[in-house]
Image (tube, rainbow, N blue to C red):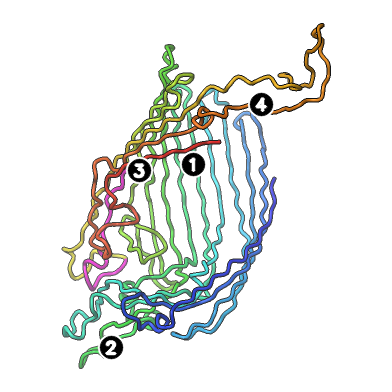
Amino acid sequence: MAIGGEYDAPRFTRTRDSLNNTFQSIGSTDGQSYRVNRDIWAIYEEVRVPFTSPTWNFPGFYSLEVDFAEREEWYSQNTSTVLVPFQAAAHTDYNAQKPKVSVRWQPLDPKYIGALTLRGSYTEAFHAPTLSELTPSGSQGFPAVQDPFTVTNPVEFRTPQQVEERVAGNPFLHPEVAYEWTYGAVYSPKWIKGLTLSADYWHIDMRDIVTVLGSQFIIQNSNHAPFDALVTRDPPPPGGVFGPVTLVQDPSFNVAGAIFEGLDYEAIYILDSTIFGGSDWGRVTTTINGTHLLRARLQPTNDSKPFGIGGQFVPTSFTLTSSLPWDRANFSIFYDGPADTWMQGLDVGAVVHYTGQYEDDNFDLTGPGNKPQTPRSGAFPDRARKVNTYTTFDLILNYTFNLPPPAPAEVPGFAKDGGKNVRSGKDGKEKNVIPVSTAEYGCSNWKWWLNNTTVSLGLQNVMDEDPPFVAGAFENGYDESLATIKGRFWYVGLKKRF
């Protein structure tokens, strides 16, 4: 059983140059000054109840335990006044009380079929907006956009490829809440020693999600409320309806919700050489783990239709999640040296990282006329494309020095059995004395520094694979949430454990 409490009082002040506050400077990214503070009180408690125990040998319930936990939090926050657009100083407060229940059940004694564990949990989560998400002050950006409402206008009345955007917080945001449940199993079969299999299904139902929607989404929906109020346009051409976009206000919103479902899996096999009855030449550990995304759906507003975002590239301006390929996996194989030899500190292996194929930003690439529910249905469906798979290969070598401990030196007043009796005198009889010291001497030379020291040598992205091209990634042409442009590189590490 555990119980505890917490108090936190974060404060944040950002003071910008007076010219930056006007959004009129040249050569810098403008933004507004602000102050925001918050006080948080919390208490939490947890209790674990073992309903059955292996010592009872109860049929069908070899081991059953349930964990109950709860957390309560109270928030109070204040934001400063912002002049453009005007937003008065505000005060808000809210609280939450969220439980968690988890179950771990072993139905049978491992001696029958091996170790089988069934597990599951139900959790209600609560996440308050961050301080930067609360302040209404804006920060300037210039994202690339496509305006479907001006493509038929004369060229001088069309929205340019880049527009000014001001990303801002919102002092009246609600906390995010989520309802999560998982269930799965872990199995180590009796007849294959060293093998462990596990799989867990997870479901996350998020509501009142705090995020900025991005300029492209706002422009795409600027022909109706509430998004029309966030877009500033110049006058339209004669007889036209929409003029070119000059400014997009992108405040944080509580979007209606999102649902994510998936399957995590893992297989571990440890081949210990001693199982063959011969000498110990070490062990080999092979691991495969990954995630398969089953569903990802987003509903921006209560009156909008939900649409799938699974298996798609997600621009970095969308803060809810990174890109969502259907499959990601890792494969590794490592060798550990035999015990009680100079090779016992050796750990060498390789890791393969795999990211499956997924859709590019086809909602934007295919042009006007499409919908989030059907991103390939725009005026230019031939522009739709997929992002290729991405596989990299790493090599890792670790060696830990494990030197034998030095023989303890005899210390006056200290007996090996932990007492204070020592032999003295001609007769060799024990007598009780006051100890001079009860400390064991250790190595004070180079061996002491070398012992428990790990030297690492690694090579990442051995084949120097370039990340796959992503047409929707305006900034750099690749998906920075899933890949890197560092290419092949090696590293050396040194760690000393005291």
Mark 1 or mark 3, earlier in chain: 1
Mark 4 or mark 3, earlier in chain: 3
Number of dots carrying numbers: 4
- For disc 4, the neighbor class at 10 Å (few under 14, some 14 to 19, many from 20) is few
In contact (CB < 8 Å): disc 4 and disc 3: no
Q: Please give the residue where the numbered disc 4 appears in the rendered image.
A: 440
**Does 333 appear above or below 490?**
above
Q: Secondary structure at mark 2?
A: loop
Q: What residue is rendered at 55% in x and 65% in y?
A: 128
Tell me where residue 25 sits by quadrant: bottom left
Q: Which residues are magenta?
A: 353-372
**Badge number at residue 329:** 3
What amino acid is at disc 2?
Asp
Q: What residue is rendered at 19% in x and 84% in y?
A: 153
Residue 33 in percent (x, y) is at 48, 78
CA distance separating discs 4 and 2: 82 Å
Mark 1 or mark 4, earlier in chain: 1
Mark 1 or mark 2, earlier in chain: 1
Quarter of the image containing the C terminus? top right
- For disc 2, the neighbor class at 10 Å (few under 14, some 14 to 19, many from 20) is some
**Badge number at residue 234:** 2
CA distance separating discs 1 and 4: 49 Å
